Amino acid sequence: MNRIAVEKKVLNENQVLAEQLRERYRQVGLLCVNLISAPGSGKTALLERTLERMDKTTRVAVLTGDLQTENDAKRLAKFGFPVKQITTGGTCHLDAKMIGKHLEGWKLEELDLLIVENVGNLVCPSSYDLGEDAKIVLLSTTEGEDKPLKYPSIFFKSELMLLTKVDLLPYVPFHVELARENARRVHPGMEIIDVSSTTGQGLDRWMDWLGARQEKAQAKPQSVTR
Amino acid sequence: MDRVRMHELGIATSILECVQAEAKRHPDGRITKVGVRIGELSGVDRDALQFGFEVLVKDTDWESLVLELEYVPRMQRCLKCACEFHMTDFDPRCPLCGEFGTQCISGEELDIAYMEVDG
């Protein structure tokens, strides 16, 4: 018997494709964010409000993933930005290959921001790099405060947590401080923004966050020399 | 191979594909075991992965291939005193000096570590 060292990522194939996407985004100064949450945490509603507020000169495109239906793409197409639905047909997450395939037909150099809305799931999307600049996790006030502890991987890997549906706080037994504490136990120093897609609370801060990241992404192609 | 749907089954498929690719480099040997490191933060359930793998290789030429999983705990290193510790109950504080600033140094692994070849 002969033992050979392999030392390779299990999801190497996905990783390679993700790195290629990241490089393509970097070359054109495009910011890509990957929105992840449980089903029903308000990813699509947040995107509606985001696109509605988006400066019309910003060139945004959205890829939205679901197991079935084109419903989300229909909801998001009204805002006049290009939107494509990725129906996974049962697969519980998006992978880099699906992203690459659905980007066909779009000119990346004509985009400033690509928002990927992942399949509603807190487990599997955390393992698949999509070439994004940042993963963003949503936690809504109708869920449990202990979600970050139950699904640590995605909270650990996300740069930003959006606490959604904060307009419901007077009506639900949700302990905001405990939720924040749990998120930061898993991911010390994680940035958290409270938002409500219904009342608009916190959306300015979220748009500012996106704008700042976008500026950073745009500055990159000039500053990085290879 | 067709896309498989369950998370761990997809990961099992990626592991098997990696073994199959490696097997081509050892035409006279037979790969009997594959060792995979699973970090505490990887989001992969070991039992589900083991089960998915067994289902995947059943009634194929790879039925006797053994999947060995090594669990890697989430370790932190204190930025102040450099103490390394297993982070339990998501408490990032250094157990020696109480410092909050500690850095994750392992636990994210989802790696194929080794394979064993007969012959």
Image: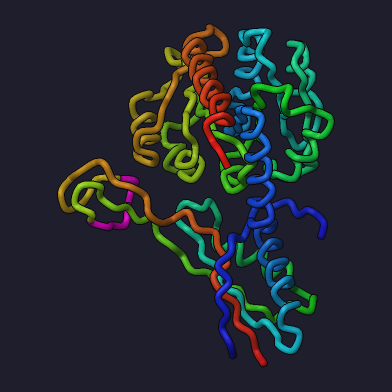
Q: Residue furthest bottom?
A: B119
Rendered position, A210 above or below B67: above
- Residue A189 in which image quadrant: top left
- Residue name at image x 50 percent, y 10 percent: A204
Judging from the image, the colouring scheme is: rainbow
- Residue name at image x 73 percent, y 34 percent: A66
Q: Quadrant of the N terminus of chain B?
A: bottom right
- Residue B34 in which image quadrant: bottom right
Rendered position, B47 above or below A208: below
Q: Is residue B118 left or right of residue A219?
A: right
Magenta-tinted stretch: B83-91
Within the magenta stretch, is there residue A58? no
Q: Quadrant of the C terminus of chain B?
A: bottom right
Rendered position, B1 above or below A33: below
Q: Most prominent secondary structure in the magenta stretch? A: loop
Whether residue B58 is visible to the viewer of this picture, yes or no, is: yes
Question: Which percent across, then down, holds residue A194?
Answer: 45, 18
Question: Which percent across, then down, holds residue A71?
Answer: 78, 23
**Number of numbered discs overlaid on the protein picture:** 0
Question: Which percent across, then down, holds residue B53?
Answer: 67, 67
Q: Residue furthest left?
A: B97
Question: Which percent across, then down, holds residue A166?
Answer: 47, 16
- Residue name at image x 72 percent, y 33 percent: A65
Rendered position, A106 above or below A48: below
Closer-to-camera residue (A110/A3): A110
Q: Is residue A170 left or right of residue B6?
A: left
Whether residue A92 is visible to the viewer of this picture, yes or no, is: no
Closer-to-camera residue (A109/A142): A109
- Residue name at image x 65 percent, y 58 percent: B11
